[in-house]
Amino acid sequence: ADNKDPKLISHPVVVLFSDLVWTRLAQWFFLLGRIYFLFTLLVFLTSQSILSHLNAGYESFEEHIAIFLCRVFIYLGSMCKLIFSQSRLLMIDVQQGSFVKVFGVVPVPDYLFSFQEAGSLCLLITLGLMCSQEPIFWCLENQDGDFPGNGIFTTSCPEAKDHKDIYSVFSCIAMLWYFALLTDLTIFSMRVSAFLLVCFRVISELGLFLLALAFLILAFATSISSLNHKLKDFAGIGKGTLSLFEVTLSMYPTSHFEDAERGLGAARGGDVHHSGRHLPVEPAGGAVEPGLSDSV
């Protein structure tokens, strides 16, 4: 692989040796690591998306205990494990001097160019931000205060009120990263792996398409905004951009199409009419007769 020789890497001996190492040794270590990661995801999902919504009101004592245990496991069993693995990979790159300069200026460790490791770093940062905004920690000094839902490991104290919204945002982002990192399991299916590889290849083309779409929508929105019309859906660049985006997604109400066509058509006709009124009429003699331009 280092020599970039396809004949050498596809030699039957190399293929046989690779298959033996994968099936007899590496596969099981990889599978154990993924099973632990999947279990971590289930614990995180239980804590953030199930236990917190079992009751319409405040959580019970048992739910407080269960949520606390799940979140402690996430912070100790997942976040600390990520800290260890990221630190180990960073130290290896530092010792070997494996850095790549982005834009020719910013040195970035080589291991971060792997999707799994870069995603793990993003997940680690998100979990750290969650831990800093954890409502349970903010309520530790006022668990038995005079407020609804009080009790041990509560999240309903007044001190945690300002932290809940941002905590929920970080929780949402962390959940997405957990599921994104599960794509590693596609290695057990060649068909799914090929599909995922094609999806990653198409992402760049999709980005170019969205860029071209945004350019066209902005161009037409600003052009329509410069017309003299009375359409509420196109009153200004912002509303015009939103309306054209709805048209692109086939979400624009069909009842508004007729009004838009009539309004924009009248605006174009009115502009031509007003410009024609101020055009000077030149008679055969070459001089402009006063008053004729207003009578046209």
Image: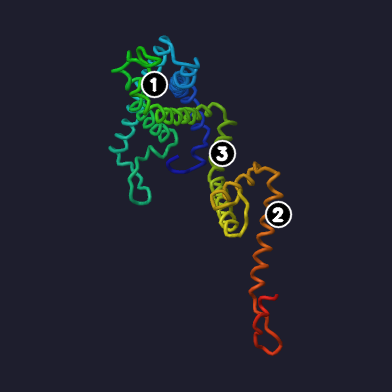
Disc 1 residue type (three-letter):
Ile
Residue drawn at point x = 47 percent, y = 23 percent? 27
Q: Secondary structure at mark 1?
A: helix
Of residues 21 and 114, the one nearer the viewer is 114
Q: Are marks 1 and 2 in contact (CB under 8 Å)?
A: no
Q: Is residue 272 left or right of residue 164?
A: right
In x, y percent, where is residue 273? 68, 67
**Which numbered circle lies on residue 74?**
1
Mark 3 or 2 closer to N-term? Answer: 3
**Which numbered circle lies on residue 199?**
3
As displayed, is residue 261 above or below residue 286?
Answer: above
Mark 3 or 1 closer to N-term? Answer: 1
Mark 1 or 2 closer to N-term? Answer: 1
As displayed, is residue 236 above or below residue 289?
Answer: above
C-alpha span from label 3 to label 1: 31 Å
Crowding at mark 3 (Cα within 10 Å: few <14, some 14-19, many 20+): few
**Residue that carries the numbered disc 2 in the rendered image:** 262
Residue drawn at point x = 35 percent, y = 26 percent? 131
